[in-house]
Image (cartoon, grey):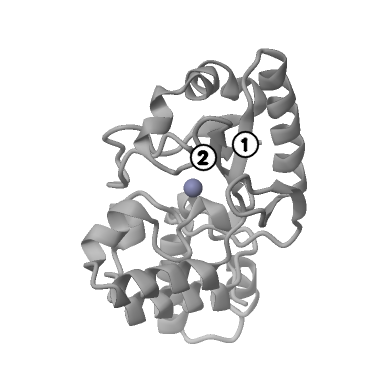
Amino acid sequence: MTNVGDMVGIRRGLSRTAQKNLRVRRDVLDRSRPVVMLSGMAADYLTRIHSIHHALGIPAGYPARRHLPIQREARRLVVAARAADDGQPVRLSPRAAAAWKKMQAAAAREGVNLLPLSGFRSVARQTAIIRQKLADGQTLPAILRLVAAPGCSEHHTGRALDLGDSNHIALDVDFAKTPAFRWLMKRAGEFGFRLSYPLKNRHGIDYEPWHWFCHW
Ligand SMILES: [Zn+2]
């Protein structure tokens, strides 16, 4: 793992040129702060993401151009629910799980039955999903309008949740026509959730009314 602290720590004993390079390198790292990489994100994790992108043919500039930062993979997860469609465990970070439970209870009190469909997804799983779509004959640009590249999915963090309700458990834009979606648009912010991919979003990802991210 390499971080700025390590780089400053090894500065002593370097040639003048090497010190200059180190300064430049540190500046580059400092400027990249918004990409959520510095505070302990392991260099080997970033290397792994880059090599997966390379293998899939995803251009190196993809995260920056699409405003999709590299997301950390969650280490602590709890089973927050069972998916309403296939019964699989929906895993979330402990904090997101607590926020979700409060939001679901508040919605239920107002007659809205929010149902979880998907939570945490690993980088390996995201890679397998994209490989399968490529094998099925879809083009990479078409795939990347529907799913984020491995490493860039909010689902890696355990804080993203795909939602349906009792009348609608498919991940499609018709969820936007449901009372559940209208409730979420009005109230989800009170529980720390926001809609990540609204219509015509800057990430170039198609409208996803079902995908909510807990920023707490
Ligand atoms: Zn999602």
Mark 2 vs 1, N-terminal side: 1
Which residue is tagged 1? 115
Q: Residue furthest top?
A: 110
Nearest to the observer: residue 129 or residue 38: 129
Seen at 28% across and 76% down, the residue is: 57
Of 10 and 43, nearer the camera is 43
Identified by mark 1, the residue type is Leu
Whether the residues at callouts 2 and 1 have beta carbons within 8 Å, the answer is yes
* Number of numbered callouts drawn: 2
Rounded to the nearest angstrom, the CA distance separating label 2 from label 1 is 8 Å
How many residues crowd mark 1 within 10 Å: few (<14), some (14–19), many (20+)? many
Please state the horizontal and vertical placement of residue 202, each as a whole percent of the image. Answer: 29, 40
State the image coordinates of residue 176 (x, y, percent, origin top left): 40, 27
Left or right for 209, reference 157 = left
Name the element at disc 1. strand
Image quarter of the N terminus: bottom right
Amino acid beneath label 2: Ile
Quarter of the image for the C terminus: give it.
top right
Across and down, in percent, residue 67 comes to 35, 49
Residue at the spot x=70%, y=21% of the render? Answer: 108
Q: Is residue 92 placed above or below 180 in the rendered structure?
A: below
Q: Residue at x 31, y 37 (%)?
A: 201
Is the C-beta of the residue carrying label 2 under 8 Å from the nearest atom of ligand 1?
no
Circle on res. 169? 2
Q: Residue at x 54, y 36 (%)?
A: 164
SS class, disc 2: loop
Q: Which mark is residue 172?
A: none
